[in-house]
């Protein structure tokens, strides 16, 4: 039997049938006008999802990690200083990448479970009277801990310090699922990937690049070739790419944006919030807590559940995969074993989430954890039935 179970990992996410079909297309010459016709709506759609009024959308054959690399290598020079808070595996990996590119990273060490500390960012920028810091890096949604940072708040901190650094935001696990306001938040580069909120296979890095980042590109000297925005923009002007693009994924991206906009971006965000809230009710009913230390930090796309003393979250994830054919996320780095992660982003409904919660409970019972079967499911059921609105089922 082919497993038809949904996945509960924070990417790749479950794919709507219409998006899968849109990716499956005959060979198309990427230098033909037909490609340009297909590419334009994808670019325009990304602009709307990012809420971006100025600058350029760049879509690279890569993944979110490549998006990080494109952001720094196109705008910075060896030895430049960047400021970043480290509070999880994804913020850590971007910092590590900067260091490997010969950048000097001023790191604000922050306990895992907390978000980007606005006061410390403001203080670091105020202390930098010589303007050494060229960019501030922020992970909007730390996928390792399920923590959402206040991006608008970081922009306010930068403005309060009167600092002119560029502002780069990793929105890989938030964009398309949680509100994102590139222009209003003064974000100079926003990074997304195809396999999370956009519900596509992995394979695209999707970037919004604002005017200040485009200006920095002219003088930055870090080496880049495959990810060079200048080559991309030159080819874009002619309707194409400097090399062979992932044509099927770009067709899928245009369709994914239609799917998001048919539901309505605000409705998509509200759905993610409801699904997440149901999961959090279940976690509370289990007597457990999210890794995120306070409600203002709760992510609407991923919950890292702190498991009781003496339990190992990785055991649950292994058992769920082996016995029930259901995927959850393991704890990464500092929180390995201490949490398991429930991804609740992309194509998901109340009913699908309930199946994931039920599976997690079966695993807990199998492992002898002190959790009553049905307790978390019931808490989520009560919440979902009290907050559900009539749902239009898309016929395909
Ligand atoms: C998934 C993820 C990444 C890495 O993206 P890849 O597509 O796996 O390279 C980066 N940042 C965050 C916050 C993520 O969730």
Image: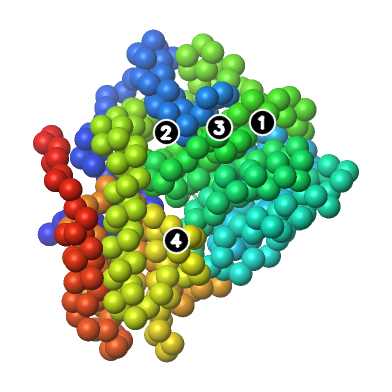
Residue in the picture at 34% in, 39% down: 266
Q: Select label 1 or label 3 by which is in front.
A: 3
CA distance separating discs 1 and 3: 13 Å
Q: Which of marks 3 and 2 is in front?
A: 3
- Please name which of the two marks, 1 or 4, marks the residue nearer to the observer: 4
Please give left or right for residue 74 compared with residue 123 in the image: left
Residue 377 falls in which quadrant of the image? bottom left
Residue 134 seen from this side: no
Residue under label 2: 49
Q: Earlier in the sequence, mark 2 or mark 4?
A: 2
Label whose residue precedes the other's in the sequence (2 or 1): 2
Q: Residue under label 4, please give it.
A: 298
Which residue lies under the disc numbered 3?
183
Alpha-carbon neighbours of circle 3 within 10 Å: few (<14), some, or many (≥20)? some
Q: Residues within 10 Å of mark 4 (few under 14, many from 20)?
A: many
Q: Which circle, 2 or 4, is nearer the viewer? A: 4
Q: Residue sitting at 41 percent across and 15 percent down?
A: 36
- Quarter location, residue 359: bottom left
Residue 171 x/y as whole percent: 50, 45
Q: Residue at x 23, y 42 (%)?
A: 16
Residue 107: image quadrant is: bottom right
- Asked if the residues shown at circle 2 and circle 1 are in contact, with their CB atoms under 8 angstroms apart, the answer is no
Q: How far apart are marks 2 and 4 (CA)?
A: 21 Å
Q: Does the CB distance between marks 3 and 2 fall below 8 Å?
A: no
Report helix, strand or loop for mark 3. Answer: loop
Above or below: residue 89 compared with residue 376: above
Tell which of 201 and 76 is nearer to you.
Answer: 76
């Amino acid at each position: 039997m082919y497993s038809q179970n949904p996945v509960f990992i924070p990417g790749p996410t479950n794919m709507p049938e219409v998006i899968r079909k849109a990716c499956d297309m005959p060979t198309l010459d990427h230098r033909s006008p037909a490609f340009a016709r297909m590419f334009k709506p994808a670019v325009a759609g990304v602009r709307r999802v990012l809420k971006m009024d100025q600058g350029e959308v760049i879509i690279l054959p890569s993944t979110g990690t490549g998006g990080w690399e494109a952001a720094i290598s196109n705008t910075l020079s060896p030895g430049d200083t960047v400021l970043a808070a480290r509070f999880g595996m994804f913020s850590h990996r971007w910092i590590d990448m900067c260091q490997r590119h010969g950048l000097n990273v001023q790191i604000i060490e922050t306990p895992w479970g907390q978000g980007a500390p606005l006061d410390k960012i403001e203080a670091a920028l105020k202390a930098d009277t010589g303007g050494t810091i060229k960019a501030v890096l922020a992970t909007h949604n730390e996928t390792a801990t399920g923590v959402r940072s206040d991006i608008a708040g970081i922009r306010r901190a930068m403005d309060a310090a009167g600092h002119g650094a560029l502002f780069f935001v990793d929105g890989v696990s938030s964009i398309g699922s949680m509100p994102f306001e590139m222009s209003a938040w003064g974000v100079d580069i926003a990074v997304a990937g195809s396999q999370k909120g956009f519900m596509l296979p992995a394979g695209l890095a999707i970037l919004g690049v604002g005017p200040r980042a485009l200006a920095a590109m002219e003088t930055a000297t870090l080496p880049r070739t495959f990810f060079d925005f200048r080559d991309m923009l030159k080819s874009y002007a002619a309707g194409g790419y400097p090399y062979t693009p992932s044509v099927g994924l770009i067709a899928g991206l245009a369709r994914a944006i239609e799917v998001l906009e048919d539901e309505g971006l605000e409705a998509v965000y509200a759905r993610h919030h409801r699904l997440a809230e149901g999961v959090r009710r279940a976690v509370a009913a289990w007597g457990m807590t999210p890794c995120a230390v306070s409600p203002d930090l709760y992510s609407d796309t991923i919950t890292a559940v702190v498991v009781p003393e003496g339990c190992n979250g990785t055991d649950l994830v292994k058992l769920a995969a082996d016995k029930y054919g259901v995927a959850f996320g393991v704890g990464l780095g500092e929180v390995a074993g201490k949490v398991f992660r429930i991804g609740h982003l992309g194509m998901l409904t109340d009913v699908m989430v309930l199946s994931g919660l039920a599976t997690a409970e079966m695993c807990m019972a199998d492992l002898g954890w002190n959790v009553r079967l049905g307790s978390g499911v019931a808490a989520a059921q009560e919440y979902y039935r009290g907050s559900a609105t009539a749902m239009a089922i898309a016929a395909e």
